[in-house]
Image (tube, rainbow, N blue to C red):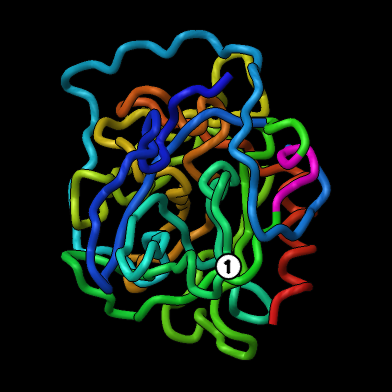
Amino acid sequence: MFTPGKQAQAGRHADICHISRGGGHDRRVNGNMRRAVPMVAVSALAVCTPALPAARPAASAGPRATPFGGTPAVGALFADRGGRLRHFCTASVVRSPHGDLLITAAHCLSGKSLRPAGAVTFAPGYHDGKFPHGRWLVRTVYVDRRWRTDRDPDDDVAFLVAGRPGRRIEKYTGAETMATNARLPREVRVVGYPDARNRPITCAAPARLAPGHRRQLVFRCAGYTGGTSGGPFLAQVRRATGTGRVIGVIGGYQQGGNRSDVSYSSRFLANVAALYRRAAAAGG
């Protein structure tokens, strides 16, 4: 069963924009995966997963994301189709030994091929049709084996190796720091690129355990529509750099959520830590 989420939407994986030789965006959809596996393409098949309790309707006075000029370590993922860029998800740079690692939601890469080189690119700090830090090709994707085989929503996390060998994107953008087993609830800032905008959005609110599910986080703030999948949950954000500790990414249950005011993330536990170590060791 395929369930809408927050990728660039086929649910919430619809196009953001088509820019000739330019940029793009995405958000969420539904999924299920454990052990790190490098891949060039990911299947789009999803399976039925146990439902979480229904999310409470957001109060009209609740928080709402606002557009802003972006932050260097967070950017938009684009698919290049004959020179036309289609934005489909959000990703962020994470600190690693080789300085070339990104994090996003695993469902974002479902059905995407990395060939030819440059078929999928990352645009850090993208806004208003501009690429202040260029576009970086994505050359390898790492997901957990349980995501690859079962689309387990508790493993809806992917690490991407970006740039040509020897290039260190982290040198130009700075990087978020991976954090697993974060104490909850925790105030986070969530950044994402909605399909309907040419700028990222941001909102600060608590990340909590999802009701009845200890391996999912929930974040309540309106405005996270298609294209925001993969957007980082950032704790302890530094005012000077905009970087922080990433404790989740929009994804997981319902591939991030079927409503724009409720967003989910796979909880970063030992499975995500192991996946990170494998991807970080293989970069460069």
Residue at the location (65% across, 13% down)?
50
Q: Is residue 146 left or right of residue 218?
A: right
- What stretch of residues is rendered in magenta? 143-148
Residue hosting label 1: 115
Residue 261, image x, y percentages? 31, 26
Q: Nearer the viewer, residue 246 or 276?
A: 276
Question: Residue 126 sits in which quadrant?
Answer: bottom left
Looking at the image, which residue is at 36% across and 72% down? 72
Image check: 57 left or right of 129?
Answer: right
Residue 206 spot, x, y in % from top left: 42, 35
Residue 61 visible in the picture: yes
Q: Is residue 68 left or right of residue 263?
A: left
Q: Amino acid at mark 1?
A: Arg
Q: Residues within 10 Å of mark 1 (few under 14, many from 20)?
A: few
Relative to 82, is 135 above or below?
below
Expressed as whole percent of the image width and height from the top left, the position of residue 274 reads 80, 54
Main SS category, magenta section: helix
Figure disc tally: 1
**Magenta stretch contains residue 145:** yes
- Asked if residue 163 is positioned above or below residue 214 in the image, the reply reads below
Name, please, the residue furthest toward the bottom.
166
- At mark 1, the secondary structure is loop
Q: Quadrant of the C terminus?
A: bottom right
Of residues 131 and 178, the one nearer the viewer is 131
Residue extending farthest to the right is 35
Percent position of residue 110, x then y: 57, 44
Residue 158 counted in the magenta span: no
Rendered view: 13 above or below 164? above
Q: Which image quarter is the N terminus in? A: top right
